Image (cartoon, grey):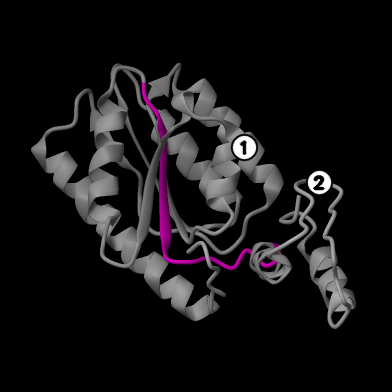
Amino acid sequence: IVTPYGARVVKTLEALAGLPLEIVAPSHGVIWRSHLGEILKAYRNWSVCKPKAKVVVMYDSMWGSTGLMAQAIYEGAALPGVEAKVIGLRQSNLTRLATEMLDCAAIAFGSATLNQDMMPMAAAAVNYIGGLRFTGRDAFAFGSYGWGKGGAEKLDEALKAMKWDVMREPIKSKFRPDAACLAECREAGRALAERAQARAAAAGYERLLTD
């Protein structure tokens, strides 16, 4: 809830400055009775989409090919000092996805092709994430296809519609990815991690005790 209404959150935090707080009870979420300084710092980061050096690789796969690509991107992104996570959309949920994206700097989003479009869970994630209006993210799309293309291309269009910084053309594999495709995925993951480091440094992310 803090991302679509970030300006209001910032205004409220300014009004709270200097007050002797005992409880933070937002209309959405957990009631806090301790660690108040930490949660207010977290709200400041979230409200302006301030990222840390974190990469999220999310995907929906049909027969495992897009999953192999996702794993290779994750391996490339797992640089020292970078928090990298891979999320299979059908093994997770939209709430977890939104939570992971609150403080990430870069995203790789993958989908196999179904009926010349992205997979249903990928489409659901696009719809949900778009409504949360995350800003200031580097991203690219990837995915496998068989008889016809479409999944990765539709994801690429969605990322651009969110006004994220799409750093490259989609990585596509016809059927199962070969060694060259997986090498390209690893290199793209590394480039995404380097972008995440640069974006986090520029944003001045306020580290929390849990980081």
| Depicted 169 relative to depicted 90: above or below | below
Amino acid on which disc 1 is placed: Thr
| Depicted 168 relative to depicted 201: above or below | above
Amino acid on which disc 2 is placed: His
Residue 206 - label: none
The region drawn magenta spans 47-61
Based on the picture, tell me whether residue 57 belongs to the magenta stretch: yes
| Mark closer to the chain start, 1 or 2 | 2
Based on the picture, tell me whether residue 184 belongs to the magenta stretch: no
Other residues around mark 2 within 10 Å, as few (<14) / some (14–19) / many (≥20) = few
User: Callout 2: helix, strand or loop?
Assistant: loop
Locate residue 113, reporting x and y percent: 39, 23
Q: In percent of the image, x 52 and y 25: which residue is there?
A: 121
- Taking the image as shown, residue 23 lies to the left or right of residue 211, namely right
Residue 118 can be seen, yes or no: no
Residue 157 can be seen, yes or no: yes
In this rendered view, identify the residue nearer to me: 177 or 25.
25
Question: Circle 1 sits on which residue?
Answer: 95
- Taking the image as shown, residue 62 lies to the left or right of residue 21, namely left
Locate residue 34, reporting x and y percent: 72, 62
Quarter of the image for residue 125 reads: top right
Quarter of the image for residue 59 reads: top left
Q: In percent of the image, x 70 and y 72: which residue is there?
A: 37
